Image: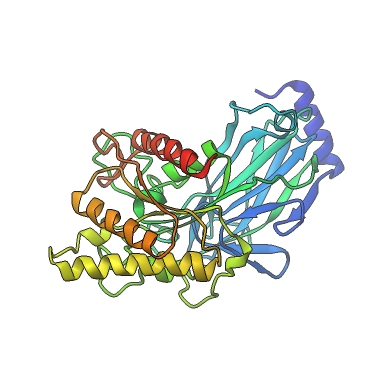
Amino acid sequence: MASRVAVALLAARVAAGAETFVTAVDPRVSLTGRHYAVPGGGVLFDWEAVTARVNVSGALYFKALVRVPAGSRSKFVIDEPWSSAREAGGAKDTDGFVLGDGLWADGATAAADGTTTLYVAGLDPGTTYTIRVFHDLEPLFHGAVAYGPGNATLLGFATDGAFAAAPALPRRLEWVGDSLTAGFGSRGAAPPCGATQITSSNFHSYSRLACDALGAACSVIAWSGKGMYENCCDTDGETLPGYFRQTLGNEAFSQTWNFSAFIPDALVINAGTNDEGKNNGTAAWSDAFEGTFVAFVVDAVKVRYATPTMPVLLVQGPSLDSRLFSSLTRIQAALAAAGVDAHYVSAVVDAPPDGCAGHPGQVNHVLMAKAFTSAAAKILGW
């Protein structure tokens, strides 16, 4: 509960109109994830894990201003994963806290101009916070009820305190995957349950947990049901190599992503589970799947990122599919022959699915994150 002094101070600041606003593209804002700038200083996006970080001091509250289309809504998490003051002093902050989990920007309930204000209060004005605004939903889930196209525009931030220089994370990872990376059904606590906007969350996925454990800024291109060669559930839909080239997931020809804007230290790929559902057991199918996978990786590191030495982590988990394992083994060998530094990484866990729709839940994702983090740290020398 806020102290009487804090309440009085907040009332005085509000009465005096003492609020500072910065746009999403202000130099004091650190942005990670695929987006493009729009007029007025906002940034538009639809991929999960698009993240803004700001350093805030002397504040009692913090606001993020978000706009979504009338027929769409999206979910955010605002948290303080580490303390700027402690980090500057050389200490690792382990008691970061979530300020707001599952904060909705909803076109149906927004202000007249379409803006939703995500508000968190109770900050200590004597503390410097590194606040993270994290986009929680994959492109699949932007519809007003459950599924459908949409996007979100982050307009900027406001506080009664002050914005300091932008925080920076020197390590970078790019993730490409399907539902396992996206966090489809990851918030399920007592299956059986369905995977929805409510029960799905990239913030609760192993990719986000691993990024935080490794201290890495991460870009995520993950869409449930999608494959490298064939999707699980739509025979003529776009596959992961196509999505990888796009700035937005829900607009196939919106803009080709500027790959020089974010060059990761490693490319992480957890894909193939959906493809394997279409495996007819023939050598021709395996050759086509593996060839598509290899061509995608070679194009990504040698052409798109123009970084031939970039490590590529081929992740399998949480279950061990023997046919996919065999394919990933051959894919790793083919990539090595093509001069790519590829590594197989197991995120296989010995636990039943604990999430929704047969997917890993919060326990499984923690186990996957631990397995991935341990392997990745050794491979990358982190």
Residue 363 against residue 43 in the figure, above or below: above
Picture coordinates of residue 380, whole percent (x, y): 51, 44
Q: Residue at x 58, y 59 (%)?
A: 263
From the viewer's side, name the closer residue of 61 and 268: 268
From the viewer's side, name the closer residue of 308 and 101: 308
Q: Residue at x 70, y 42 (%)?
A: 62
Q: Quadrant of the C terminus?
A: top right
Residue 193 against residue 304 in the figure, above or below: above
Q: Residue furthest left?
A: 281
- Side of 347 relative to 324 (left or right): right
Tally of numbered discs: 0
Residue 266 against residue 189 in the figure, above or below: below
Q: Quadrant of the N terminus?
A: top right
- Side of 56 relative to 290 (left or right): right
Picture coordinates of residue 132, whole percent (x, y): 62, 43
Picture coordinates of residue 64, whole percent (x, y): 66, 49
| Residue 209 in view | no
| Residue 194 in view | yes
Q: Residue furthest bottom?
A: 253
Q: Quadrant of residue 126?
A: top right
Picture coordinates of residue 316, whole percent (x, y): 32, 48
Q: Residue at x 43, y 46 (%)?
A: 201
Colour setup of the view? rainbow
Residue 364 against residue 44 in the figure, above or below: above
From the viewer's side, name the closer residue of 349 and 96: 349
